[in-house]
Amino acid sequence: MRYIVPGLSRGVAMLRLFSREHPELSAAELAAGAGVSRSTAFRLIYTLEAEGLIARTADGRRYVLTGEVLGLGYHYLSTRSIGEVAQPFLEDLSRRTHLSTYLAVLDGRDAVYTAHVPAQASLVSSLRVGARQDAWSTSSGRILLAAMDSAALDRFIKRHLPAREKLKPTELRRQAADDREAGVVHKRSDFDPHMASCAAAVRGASGEVVAAVTAIGPASLVLDPALAASIETEVRRCAEALSGALGSRAD
C-alpha cells in the first residue's frame, strides 16, 4: 500500500464516476463522488482535462469523458482475442442454462468455434474449439449470415454455397431475413437430432456483428416450449453483455 500514489487513485476514482446513467458530472459531483475537497477536486479535474481524458460540456458547467478514455479500453481489448474476452461470459451462461456454450465467428463458408465451456451434464455437445461447420447449417452461422446486408449475402452465396446444397439461394436469403427479424436462432442439429442450439449475435466497438454466442444441449431441453424462452433470454443477455465488454453501445 505504501507505493500507491493517492492522487492517481483519486483521479481514477473520478473517471469511474462517469457511467451511462451519469454521462455528465459537475465539479461538485466529482468532488463528492471521489470523496475529496473542492480544492483537491479542482487540481484533479484540471489534470484530467489537461491529459485529454475529460472535457467540459458546451455550457462549461459539467464534464464528460472523451474518446481518449475509450481508446485506452480499445487498445487493451485489441491485445486480447474475442475468445479470451468471451470466456467468463460463456462460463456464466453455461451456469445459468446448464448447457454447453460457445463463441463462433465466420471464416469463409464456415462457422468456427473459438471458445467453449462444456456443460456439467451427461449429454453434452461434442464440438471443440476449432471445429468448423457450414454456416447455414448451424444456429451461430445463421445469426452471422443474418447480419450481412443483401450485397454481402449475395457474395457469400456466390462464393460459398455449393450448387448441390439442398438449401437454395432464395431459401438462404429468406432464412437470413427471418433470422435477422427474430434476432435469435433456435435450431435442431443437422448432425445429431438429439441436440439443439440457440444463438444470438455479438457486436464489436464499431457496432458490427463480430461473433455469435451459442448454447447447445439436448433438444428435449433447448426446444422445450416451457424452457426455450428462458434459454433465449439468457443467450441474448450474454450476447449483449459481451457486446458491451467489446465496446459496443446499445442503440
Image (tube, rainbow, N blue to C red):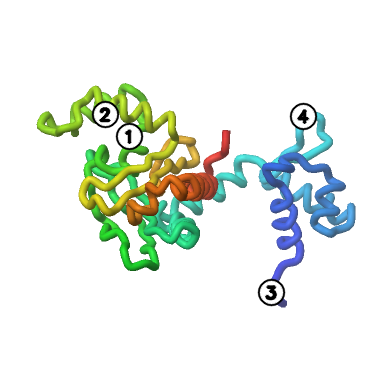
Q: Residue furthest right?
A: 38
Secondary element at image label 4 = loop
Q: Residue at x 69, y 74 (%)?
A: 3
Q: Is residue 242 visible?
A: no
Secondary element at tag 2: helix
Q: Residue at x 38, y 32 (%)?
A: 179
**Mark 3 vs 4, N-terminal side:** 3
Marking on residue 3: 3
> What residue is shown with label 1?
145
Q: Position of residue 50 (x, y in %)?
A: 72, 45
Query: In this figure, which residue is indicated by the disc labeled 2?
Result: 172
| Type of amino acid under label 3 | Tyr
Mark 3 and mark 4: span between their CA atoms? 38 Å
Q: Indicate the amino acid at tag 1.
A: Leu
- What is the number of the mark on residue 58? 4
Tell whether label 2 touches label 3 (CB within 8 Å).
no
What type is the residue that disc 2 sits on?
Leu
Q: Earlier in the sequence, mark 3 or mark 2?
A: 3
- Amino acid at the residue labelled 4: Ala
Q: Residues under labels 3 and 2: Cα distance?
A: 60 Å
| CB under 8 Å between discs 1 and 3 | no
Task: Name the side, left or right, on which 65 lies relative to 117.
Answer: right
Camera-near label (2 vs 1) is 2
Q: In the rendered view, tell whether residue 232 sits above or below residue 95.
A: above
Mark found first going from the N terminus, 4 or 1: 4
Judging depth in this view, the residue of 175 and 249 nearest the camera is 175
Secondary-structure class at tag 3: loop
* Quadrant in the rendering for residue 202: top left
